[in-house]
Amino acid sequence: MLAVAVQPAAAQAPAPERSITQVTGDLYRFQNNQHFGLYLLTRAGVIVADPINRDTANWLKGEIAARHNNAKVAAVVYSHHHWDHASGADAFEGARVLGRPEMVSALQGPAATTGLGAQAAADANRDGLLQRTEATGAMAQNFAAFDADGNGGLSAREIFLGQHRDVTAPADIWRNPIREFTLGGKIVELHHVGGTHAADLTYIHFPVERALLVVDVISPGRLPNIAADYNEAHQFELLDKAASFQATHIIGGHGLSGTKADLDAQKAYFTELRAAVQASINAGQTVEQAKASVKMEKYANWIAYRDRIGPNVEGMYAVLKR
Ligand SMILES: [Zn+2]
């Protein structure tokens, strides 16, 4: 008798969607699925804005060498410290890494006593830790690596440090509100924005290319998130600040590479969503009724519309009821 054990092929994650697009001149936008960064060619090497993650950075290093006469990455700048944009700079050996002092402190991670916060919903047994059965995504895949103290549960601190393990802390720390960085005859301006999304949030301006990279707080052509801390005055300040640059390209870390018209469109979306949800509140609707009635169909062609319109109505409803 011949017994043949057939192993089912391990479930493979789909290959990431990656691309490189010229924005203008020596400025290029690169993609890893829903995340985007930029790179600028200079005579003294390449400047990368947001390496995204280790795999993307390794891929990008190869693409840059292949496309641009064996060019190497000489510098990395960050929009902010969050792991899903800032990981992977180590792939670029010898590159100078610039960042805010707030980034250095944020990367220390929350105190060991910090509660799970947004992750608490997954804490089914309410012990303040996420066990293997409660963890999802990267936390579940890298559970043992995240669980630094090996007690079988992830604290907020362990989750943060695990998620940010591939983020290279900056060695070149800029403290003034604006840092002008020049390399190989090219200029990048870093403008500290700060605020609620991340204390180190930075707009990255390429004055010669007339391009501005805005990450997370503005995503051209994509429905925003209305988080619990949403504040319209603050959001409009961020949009006005972006509009104040001499930039013809307004480029998102998510969404599109757009123009200033996309900033106006974002403002209109927030204004119209607020008015529509307020009208439904005034009509005595529950949040479920508001979600059923407020569809913002004018924006149905925006990225993430289907996933976000419901949560956006719910978020705005909570903000207006507050
Ligand atoms: Zn972020």
Image (cartoon, rainbow, N blue to C red):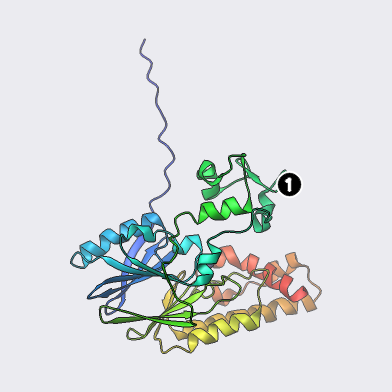
Residue type indicated by callout 1: Arg
| In the image, farthest residue toward the right | 284
x%, y% of residue 244? 48, 89
Between 173 and 185, the one nearer to me in the picture: 173
Left or right: 253, with 93 as reference point: right
Question: Which part of the image, by quadrant, shows the C terminus?
Answer: bottom right
| In the image, farthest residue toward the top | 1
Q: Which residue is at 38% across, 61% downward?
A: 89
Question: Which part of the image, by quadrant, shows the N terminus?
Answer: top left
Residue that carries the numbered disc 1 in the rendered image: 126
Between 50 and 8, the one nearer to me in the picture: 50
Q: Which residue is at 52% across, 74% downward?
A: 201
Q: Quadrant of residue 150?
A: top right
x%, y% of residue 6? 39, 25
| Secondary-structure class at tag 1 | loop
x%, y% of residue 8? 42, 32
Q: Is residue 106 in view from this perspective? A: yes
Q: Which residue is at 57% across, 59% downward?
A: 109
x%, y% of residue 198? 56, 70
Q: Look at the picture and state if 307 lies above or below 42.
A: above
Between 32 and 195, the one nearer to me in the picture: 195
Q: Quadrant of residue 298?
A: bottom right
Label 1 near ligand 1 (CB < 8 Å): no
- Other residues around mark 1 within 10 Å, as few (<14) / some (14–19) / many (≥20): few
